[in-house]
């Protein structure tokens, strides 16, 4: 019975978002209420369940997302991201432009949302492609592969951070493992896939002289931008703090430094996403703001604009968390656990499959991740699967097969000036390759670690 309600609920959610065009957050909450009733939950407990789901996700995420958005906007508005990209391109040279673009996109993707990174880097990479006289997709595909991979695997990005919280995984550990998984994934889904795509869709690999989607693009004089070192440090500050905690745990052979004393207590504090983001934000306000002779009024305007840009993303994730809580309290997760208890399949693969199905059905990687997390939690606990590995497996599944119900699909089509058919042939396949390769890397790493 639970599976019938789940399938009908997902179908309803898909109908509301795609056909009715109802706001995703409203659709998620409405579906959560109806699914809760369908699962036999007491009407008196429905509101409390939804509130619990939203509250459990917002405590950490509001700080991580909000501060992360501000840091990313400060780096981009100051010209720091422009400096990073230009420096890497100069260092690597024109013969290794793809590598330069991948490194720049990977670095910036760790501190910026996919949409922000795409808007920021597309005009820059397009200008480089024009100067080098190569097709835009030659450099564009490695760029989006790196951006998409960081969104799937690396905290403090929204989906992996949210799923890590839902599964009680160590965020620093997720980050370290995520980087190990992300590097080969980007290479395969970026430069290597680009060669394959150029063969089966050669009509898309043409040299374009303009991009209709971009009007006036903010220009920077390189000498007026922050230095490469300080720009890079500002972008990577959150990741450095969170990774340092995991490295400290490994070096001291400590399973967990939470609740420790002395140095362990301080390492636990600065390694927590909230404190790491706070310290990083304060540094960014100085390095990309005050140090660049910006007034506090200018900085506060950037803060306000960046927070406005993530409101809907936060609401959607809250809706996904509410839906997840309904599924947990309604017994769907337990039912799935019983269903697969006698199935000889890795819980990591199962988590990936569930995330893929939800991604295809709903479009949103964040919603797919959070919902999948709720469904696999009982199974993960029963099989003692590594929570950090499960976060990465779900992250890999959440980016598969992006199509017309995903905002990223339309952004890619618009920014790269492609038809819908061409976008399906390039973007949808790229995301699927990224998903499959990511899962393979997670399984290999899990076998090595455990």
Image (cartoon, rainbow, N blue to C red):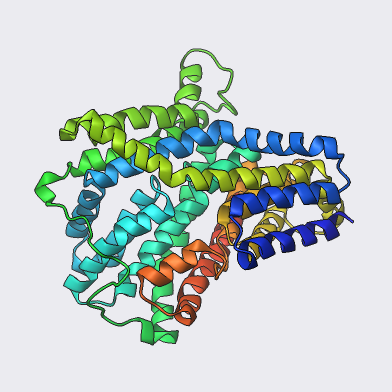
Task: Using the rendered image of the protein, determine whether residue 373 is visible from the camera's viewpoint.
Answer: yes
Residue at the extreme top: 262
The image shows residue 386 at horizontal and vertical percentages of 66, 43
The image shows residue 97 at horizontal and vertical percentages of 25, 66
Along the horizontal axis of the image, is 283 left or right of 264?
left
Residue 284 lies, with reference to residue 217, above or below; the image says above
Residue at the extreme left: 223
Q: Residue 435's image quarter?
A: bottom right
Along the horizontal axis of the image, is 383 left or right of 321?
right
Q: If the image is split into quadrants, where does the C terminus sit?
A: top right
Query: Residue drawn at (76%, 57%), measured in percent from left and top?
Result: 9
For the residue pair 440 and 36, the one nearer the viewer reads as 36
Q: Residue 321's image quarter?
A: top right
Task: Using the rendered image of the protein, determine whether residue 177 is visible from the camera's viewpoint.
Answer: no
The image shows residue 218 at horizontal and vertical percentages of 21, 55
For the residue pair 164 and 99, the one nearer the viewer reads as 164
Residue 190 lies, with reference to residue 349, above or below; the image says below
Query: Residue drawn at (16%, 45%), measured in percent from left and top?
Result: 225
Query: Residue drawn at (56%, 44%), measured in percent from left and top?
Result: 315
The image shows residue 283 at horizontal and vertical percentages of 30, 29
Residue 266 lies, with reference to residue 333, above or below; the image says above
Q: Residue 325's image quarter?
A: top right
Query: Residue drawn at (57%, 22%), measured in percent from left and top?
Result: 258
Could you tell me how many numbered marks the image carries? 0
Q: If the image is split into quadrants, where does the N terminus sit?
A: bottom right
Residue 323 lies, with reference to residue 210, above or below; the image says above
């Amino acid at each position: 019975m639970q599976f019938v309600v789940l399938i009908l609920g997902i179908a309803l959610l898909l109908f509301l978002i795609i056909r009715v065009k109802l706001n995703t957050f409203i659709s998620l909450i409405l579906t959560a209420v109806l699914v809760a009733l369908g699962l036999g939950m007491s009407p008196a407990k429905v509101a409390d369940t939804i509130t619990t789901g939203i509250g459990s996700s917002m405590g950490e995420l509001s700080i991580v997302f909000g501060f992360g958005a501000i840091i990313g906007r400060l780096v981009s508005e100051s010209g720091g991201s422009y400096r990073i990209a230009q420096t890497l391109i100069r260092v690597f040279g024109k013969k290794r432009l793809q590598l330069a673009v991948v490194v720049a996109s990977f670095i910036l993707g760790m501190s910026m949302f996919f949409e922000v990174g795409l808007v920021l880097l597309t005009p820059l990479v397009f200008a480089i492609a024009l100067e080098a006289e190569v097709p835009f997709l030659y450099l564009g595909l490695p760029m989006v592969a790196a951006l998409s991979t960081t969104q799937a695997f690396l905290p403090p990005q929204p989906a992996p951070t949210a799923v890590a919280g839902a599964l009680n995984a160590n965020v620093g550990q997720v980050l370290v493992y995520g980087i190990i998984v992300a590097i080969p994934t980007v290479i395969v889904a970026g430069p290597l896939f680009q060669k394959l795509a150029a063969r089966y869709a050669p009509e898309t690999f043409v040299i374009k002289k303009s991009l209709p989607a971009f009007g006036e693009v903010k220009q920077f004089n390189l000498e007026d931008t922050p230095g490469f070192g300080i720009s890079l440090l500002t972008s990577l500050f959150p990741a450095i703090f969170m990774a340092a905690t995991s490295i400290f745990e490994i070096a001291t052979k400590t399973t967990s430094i939470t609740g420790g004393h002395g140095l362990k207590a301080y390492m636990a504090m600065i390694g927590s996403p909230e404190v790491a983001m706070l310290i990083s934000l304060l540094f960014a306000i100085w390095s990309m703001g005050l140090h660049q002779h910006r007034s506090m009024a200018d900085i506060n305007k950037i803060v306000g604009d960046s927070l406005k840009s993530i409101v809907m993303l936060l609401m959607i994730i809250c809706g996904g968390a509410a839906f997840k809580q309904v599924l947990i309290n309604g017994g769907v997760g337990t039912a799935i656990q019983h269903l697969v208890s006698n199935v000889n399949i890795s819980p990591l693969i199962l988590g990936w499959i569930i995330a893929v199905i939800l991604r295809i059905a709903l479009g949103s990687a964040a919603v797919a991740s959070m919902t999948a997390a709720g469904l696999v939690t009982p199974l993960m606990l029963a099989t003692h699967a590594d929570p950090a590995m499960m976060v990465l497996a779900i992250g890999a599944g959440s980016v598969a097969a992006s199509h017309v119900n995903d905002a990223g699909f339309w952004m890619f089509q618009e920014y790269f000036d492609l038809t819908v058919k061409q976008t399906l042939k390039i973007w949808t396949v790229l995301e699927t390759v990224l998903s499959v390769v990511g899962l393979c890397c997670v399984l290999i790493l899990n076998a090595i670690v455990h």
